[in-house]
Amino acid sequence: MTRKKKPLPLLENITITDFAAEGKALARVDDMVVFVPWAVPGDVCDLQVRRKKHSFMEAEIVCLHTPSPLRTQPFCEHFGTCGGCKWQQLPYEEQLKMKQQQVFDQLTRIGKVELPEFRPILGSVKTKEYRNKLDFGCSNRRYLTNEEIASGKEFARDAIGFHITGAFDKILPIEKCWLMDDLHNQIRNEVRDYAIGHGMTFFDLRQQVGLLRDVIIRNSNTGEWLVIIQFHYDEEGDEQRAQGLLQHIADKFPQITALMYLNNQKCNDTIGDQDILTFKGNDHIYETMEDLRFKVGPKSFYQTNTEQAYHLYSVAREFAGLTGEELVYDLYTGTGTIANFVAKKARKVIGIEYVPEAIEDAKINSQENHIDNTLFFAGDMKDILTDEFIAEHGRPDVIITDPPRAGMHPDVVKTILRAAPQRIVYVSCNPATQARDLQDLDIDYKVVAVQPVDMFPHTPHVENVVLLIKR
C-alpha cells in the first residue's frame, strides 16, 4: 500500500528579500531558504511550494499582494513562460547592480583570493534588439500554458520557438522576440506559416521524425543576414518540399544574403559536424570592429552582442598592456576576434581553438585585414598547449584566455603556470568557474583589476574580465 504524499504548503504574506542564482529570487521562512522564479526583492506574496528538501524549498507566486517598488512592467508577451529573459520585471539599472554583486560574491566566495576594488560594470549599449543570433526549434509538440490547458480549447500543435526548461521535447511558440532586429520575427513567422500552409511536418524529438527541425538566424552590423534551416528528410519528396520553402523565403526576404540548409539525421540539433549547403548568396556574413572585418560562417562563434563585444575586447586589450614587443597567446580564440583585435599592438599573436572551421575563419580574418603577425592552431586546448608547443613557438609575455562556461581544464592551468607570462587576461562568461581558476593561479599571480561587462540584458548572465600580474 502506497503512502499518500503530504500536501506541499502554501506560504502566505512572504516578503522576497534577495536575488539568488539562475535569475531566481529568495525568501526565508522558518530558517528555510525558499527559491522563487520571476520574483523581485520587496515583493509581498503568497507562495505555493512545489518542491521541499531538508534545507530549502522551491515555490512560485500564486498571489502578489504588494509589488516591490523595484518591479517594472515586462515588455515581452512571452515573459514568465519563456525562460530567456528572467529579469524583465527589474529596471536595467537594478539588473546591473545585481550583476556587479554577483561577480563580487562569486570571486570572493569561490576564489578566496586577494582582490582589488572592482570597476563599475559596463552596461550594454542596447537593452533590446542587442543579439546578432537566435536559434529556434521546430516541433509538433507545442507547449501549452496552464491557462491554455484550463481553457479547454484546441490548439494547433506545430510550433516554432524556444525549448521549454524541463520539457526538452516541447516548444513554446514565439510570435515576437525583442532580442533581435524585428526582421528575424518576420522571417521565423513566415517559415512557420508557409510550412503549416503547405502541410509540412514538424519535427518530433521523441520519435525522430518530421521534416522541419530548426531555424538559425544571424545578422551583422554590416546589414547582412544569414539564415540556416535545418531539415530531417523522412520520405520521398521531402527534399523537394524543403527546396520549396527555401525558395519562398529567398523570394520573400531579399535582405537575406546567406540562405543555407542541411539535412540532419542525428538525434540532436547541433550542426558542428554537419555538411551545410548554400541555397542562395554567400556561405558567410561579415562583422566589423574598429577598422577590422570578421568573417562569420554558419559554424563560427562570434559574441552575440556585437556592440558590447567591442567594449569587452577593448577592456581585454587595455588589460594586456601591449607595447608592440609582446608575444601573445590567445586561448579559445574562436574566429580569432581577440587575436586580430590586439595584433597591431603586439609583436606576434598565437591563437588556439577547438573548432577547425573557426580556425580557418580566423586565418581568413587575418588575411582579409592584412594582418601578418598571427598564427592559429586547431585542437583540444589541453592537447595543443603543452610545454613542447611553448618551447617551439616561444614563451608568451601575455596570455589572453576566453574559455567556455566550464572554465579551463586543470592541465591548461598548469601549463599556463609553467609558461609564466607576465600578464594573464582572463575573459569569462561564468564568474563561478573563473573564480575557481583564479584560486589555482593564485600561487604565482595576483589579481590587480576586475571589470564586469553586461553582454545579456534582462538575464542573470554576466561577463567578467580579470587582469593577473606575475608575483
Image (cartoon, grey):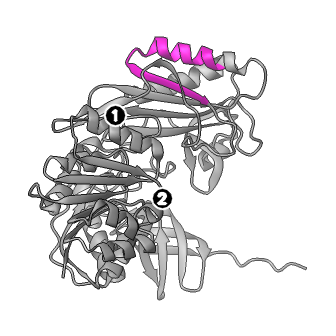
Q: Total label count?
A: 2
**Residue at screen point 42% across, 76% down:** 27
Relative to 25, is 76 above or below? above
Residue extending furthest toward the bottom: 31
Q: Quadrant of the N terminus?
A: bottom right
- Pick out the residue farthest to the top: 251
Residue 180 percent coordinates (x, y): 36, 36
Q: Residue 411: horizontal and vertical position, in percent?
A: 44, 73
Dot 1 corresponds to which residue?
295
In the foreground, 358 or 348: 348
Name the residue rendered at 17%, 55% in the picture: 317
Q: Residues within 10 Å of mark 1 (few under 14, many from 20)?
A: many
Q: Is residue 86 above or below residue 291?
A: below
Could you say which quadrant of the image residue 66 lies in? Answer: bottom left
Number of the front mark, 1 or 2: 2
Element class at badge 1 = strand
For the magenta stretch, what is the residue range? 242-262
Residue 70 visible in the picture: no
Q: Position of residue 108 (x, y in %)?
A: 29, 81
Q: Amino acid at mark 2?
A: Asp
Report the Cα–Cα distance between label 1 and label 2. Answer: 22 Å
Callout 1, which amino acid? Lys
Q: Quadrant of residue 254?
A: top left
Q: Circle 2 is placed at which residue position?
A: 380
Q: Would you say residue 404 is visible in this rendering?
A: yes
- Residue 417 percent across, percent down from the top left: 32, 76
Query: Which residue is depicted at the point 12% across and 58% down?
Result: 325
